[in-house]
Image (spheres, rainbow, N blue to C red):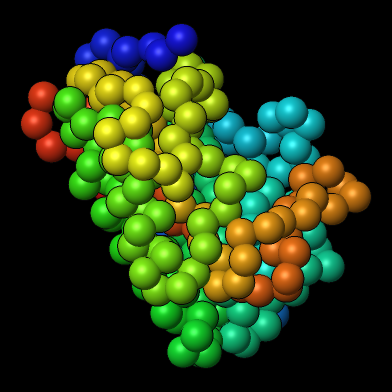
Amino acid sequence: MIILKTERELSYMRSAGRIAANALQLAGENIKPGISTLELDEIVEKYIRKNGATPSFLNYGGFPASACISPNNVVVHGIPSKNCILKEGDIVTIDVGACYKGYHGDTAYTFACGEISKEAQKLLEVTKESRKRGIEKAKKGFRIGDISSAVQEYVESHNYSVVRDFVGHGVGARLHEEPSVPNFGKKGRGVRLIPHMTIAIEPMVNIGSYYVDVLEDEWTTVTRDGSLSAQFEHTVAITEDEPVILTLPG
């Protein structure tokens, strides 16, 4: 069931989204060679709690940290660790959720650690642009498939692939709600978008094939071929007019 949000609920989600976005930005500012992913997780959790919210991911389904931190070929759900030390040239995705007064904001960004290769930089640029193109279709009267196809067509025009096993989703009082928002699909298909829907649009893009494997910890998901992966995510509200991004820092 798709749950439409009241104006009060949307205001809580704006606050949650802003806190999540600020925590994400702060973590990004601290990325440098030699820092551990656990240290970045601690930065995220401290900021979220200091600002009157709680980390959405901590203990969600048993996840043991406040942020998913996924370097290089890790697609999603990387578990922060003191033993995972970032080095020059790495890329690292940080996925952050914050819950404020019972409502969630969910956002992700793939950062560069120092100087990265041209190949990695292009992956980041294409993935970020694909999110933008998906958001542009998040309008009243459009369908989920319009978002999905916009992402897929742009990504594949650059000979990259979109991950099939994980998709975007509704967001609200629960971190994951209906509808699912795949990053692949056909125009004009799927749920029709109406005002007061709130969804997470989150392209996950691999340089190589879209096949992924979940490791023995049952969380960490890597590209099967070892290729680099990037992810960019915003929580978005459907309105009578243009889509409103709820996960902007400020």
The extreme right residue here reads: 216
Residue 138 picture location, percent across and down: 25, 37
- Is 198 situated left or right of 210 in this image? left
The extreme left residue here reads: 241
- Compared to residue 36, the image places residue 152 above or below, namely above
Nearest the viewer among 213 and 220 is: 213
Residue 80 can be seen, yes or no: no
Nearest the viewer among 27 and 148 is: 148
Residue 248 picture location, percent across and down: 30, 47
Q: Residue at x 68, y 35 (%)?
A: 58
Q: Residue at x 78, y 31 (%)?
A: 62
> Dividing the picture into quarters, in which one does residue 65 lie?
top right
> Dividing the picture into quarters, in which one does residue 63 lie?
top right
- Is 235 situated left or right of 225 in this image? left
Residue 209 picture location, percent across and down: 62, 66
- Compared to residue 22, the image places residue 56 above or below, namely above
- Compared to residue 190, the image places residue 44 above or below, namely below
- Compared to residue 129, the image places residue 42 above or below, namely above
Nearest the viewer among 151 and 124 is: 151
Nearest the viewer among 132 and 246 is: 132
- Is 140 situated left or right of 115 in this image? left
- Is 62 situated left or right of 29 in this image? right
Q: Residue at x 80, y 63 (%)?
A: 82
How many labels sit on residues?
Answer: 0
Q: Residue at x 53, y 27 (%)?
A: 175
Residue 59 can be seen, yes or no: yes
Residue 136 picture location, percent across and down: 21, 47
